[in-house]
């Protein structure tokens, strides 16, 4: 049944974290084309300003920028405060970071910053904006997780654990919000061609035998499932891989295979 356009269902404003490049920028462009006014959040102020100019010129919508480091509590609170005058009807929790290397070899400050950005920030934003959506009986929340959230990934342990948290949180919320007018979706892409992944130090993704998707295809494939299912794995090959790993392999066998794959890709000094 046709439920109308995304803007009719969730507008007028969408807020996107990690929106200056990659999947976040693809969300910003797609939702601008859908007619949303958008709030884009990222750390780099100059990149945000360039995105704002480009989006406004191409689509004619309103764009508000907030330069913020969401791994810090003060900046998460500032995002909430600076959007109090807006009706945020669609929240895209996209910002994320990696901690590359063995967990016990990780720097505490780096691992904790990853956990705050990948876990605490989306939780805090969801609690704030989601509460208003529940009161209005209208809204949408999207969590951008990862295939890594479906299994433990040696040498990306903090990252995979954070995405597993996001997967379980979003699916729980989907069940809890059924019939409330608030739709929740967890979308899990595999490797995606983004500047962040291309520039990530300590790991060579070319040594991992997985096909890369484009940010645009990830966004289009994910948003069409909002309001229809609790979670979706983006890409048939990614879905098939997860199905095989979860249904046909023991956890011990899966971990051995994943460790062997990741061991070749991670820099020796991070093992």
Image: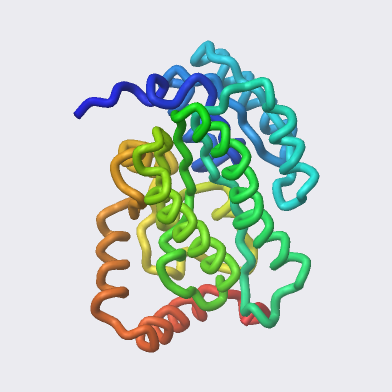
Q: In the image, what residue occupies the spot 27% across and 59% down?
A: 237
Is residue 93 shown left or right of residue 228?
Answer: right
Numbered-mark total: 0
Q: Quadrant of the C terminus?
A: bottom right
* Residue drawn at the location 42% of the way across and 83% of the way down: 255
* Colour approach in the figure: rainbow
Is residue 176 or residue 8 the one in the foreground?
176
Instruction: Please state, as top left, top right, bottom left or bottom right, where the N terminus lies in the image.
Output: top left
- Indicate the position of residue 98 as horizontal and vertical percent values: 61, 61
Residue closer to the observer: 138 or 96: 138
Which x, y percent locates residue 66? 71, 31
- Residue at 74% across, 40% down: 68
What's the residue at 35%, 38% (across, down)? 179
Rendering coords of residue 160 (x, y %): 52, 67
Image height of 250 relative to 14, above or below: below
Observer-nearest of 98 and 162: 162
Position of residue 5 measured from the top left corner of the image (x, y, whole percent): 34, 22
- Tell whether 248 sits left or right of 204: left
Q: Residue furthest left?
A: 1
Examine the rendered structure and indicate whether residue 6 appears above or below residue 216. Answer: above
Q: Is residue 183 above or below residue 196?
A: above
């Amino acid at each position: 049944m046709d439920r109308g356009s995304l803007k009719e269902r969730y507008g007028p404003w969408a807020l996107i974290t990690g929106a200056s490049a990659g999947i976040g920028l693809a969300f910003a462009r797609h939702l601008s084309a859908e007619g949303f006014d958008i709030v884009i959040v990222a750390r780099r102020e100059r990149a945000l300003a360039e995105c704002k100019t480009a989006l406004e010129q191409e689509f004619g919508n309103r764009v508000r920028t907030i330069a913020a480091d969401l791994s810090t509590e003060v900046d998460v609170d500032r995002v909430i405060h600076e959007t109090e005058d807006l009706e945020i009807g669609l929240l895209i929790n996209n910002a994320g970071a990696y901690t590359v290397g063995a967990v016990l070899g990780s720097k505490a400050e780096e691992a904790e910053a990853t956990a705050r950005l990948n876990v605490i920030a989306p939780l805090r934003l969801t609690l704030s904006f989601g509460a208003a959506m529940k009161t209005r009986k209208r809204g949408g929340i999207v969590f951008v997780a990862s295939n890594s959230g479906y299994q433990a990934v040696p040498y990306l342990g903090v990252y995979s654990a954070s995405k597993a948290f996001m997967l379980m949180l979003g699916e729980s919320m989907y069940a809890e919000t059924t019939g409330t007018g608030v739709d929740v979706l967890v979308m899990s892409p595999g490797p995606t061609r983004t500047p962040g992944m291309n520039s990530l130090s300590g790991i060579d993704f070319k040594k991992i035998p997985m096909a890369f998707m484009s940010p645009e295809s990830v966004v289009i494939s994910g948003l069409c499932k909002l309001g229809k299912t609790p979670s979706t794995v983006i890409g048939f090959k990614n879905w098939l891989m997860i199905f095989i790993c979860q249904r046909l392999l023991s956890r011990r066998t899966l971990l051995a295979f994943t460790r062997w794959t990741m061991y070749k890709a991670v820099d020796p000094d991070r093992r």
